[in-house]
Image: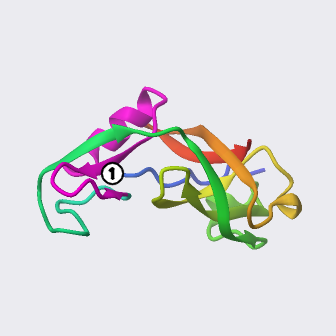
Amino acid sequence: MTESAPKPVPRPSPETQPFWDACERGELTIQRCEDCQNLQHYPRVRCTSCRSDNLAQVAVSGLGTVRTFTINRVPVSAAYAADVPYAVALIELAEGPCMMANILHCDPERVHIGMAVQITYEPRGEVQLPQFKPA
């Protein structure tokens, strides 16, 4: 029997390092523009609303709602062969921004639009990958 390939590991950039550092502490953060108060995810160099570079990482609740999802039944690579089927969802965070993540600890057939979810983390190499589970 052959061992499956390792799953990819995110490579933090200067813009995303504070996000990954917070994940390592078990804390979900998003960016807030200190000029217009816009909240955004994923981390960027500038605010998507006013283009300011005056951005801060702020902690959020880790609660959200499934906005849409798909169930992957065919692995995208050998690294995911043991995981199929699995649900990948667009999560609308309670604070507003959306993020993409897998739904863990749940039969994929039970995932539905409007489902309440909460943050959980999947150890992946040197990072804690934010995922979600039913709330």
Instruction: Find the magenta span and give its range.
Output: 11-40
- Quarter of the image where one finds residue 105: top right
In the visual, does 70 lie left or right of 44?
right
Residue 124 shown in magenta: no
Q: Report the colour scheme.
A: rainbow
Amino acid bearing label 1: Arg
**Which residue of the protein is positioned furthest toward the front in this rendering?**
36
**Which residue of the protein is positioned furthest toward the left in this rendering?**
53
Against 26, is 47 above or below?
A: below
Against 103, is 19 above or below?
A: above
Give x and y (percent) for residue 77.
62, 67
Q: Which residue is drawn at 59% across and 40% down?
A: 122
Tally of numbered discs: 1
Residue 24 shown in magenta: yes
Give x and y (percent) for residue 93.
54, 53
Q: Which residue is drawn at 80% across and 65% down?
A: 112
Front-lying residue, 15 or 95: 95
- Residue identifier under label 1: 11
Front-lying residue, 67 or 83: 67
Front-lying residue, 100 or 52: 52
Q: Can residue 12 be seen in this view?
A: no
Q: What SS does tag 1 mark?
A: loop
Q: Which residue is drawn at 24% across and 60% down?
A: 44
Give x and y (percent) for residue 101.
58, 57
In the visual, does 42 lie left or right of 93?
left
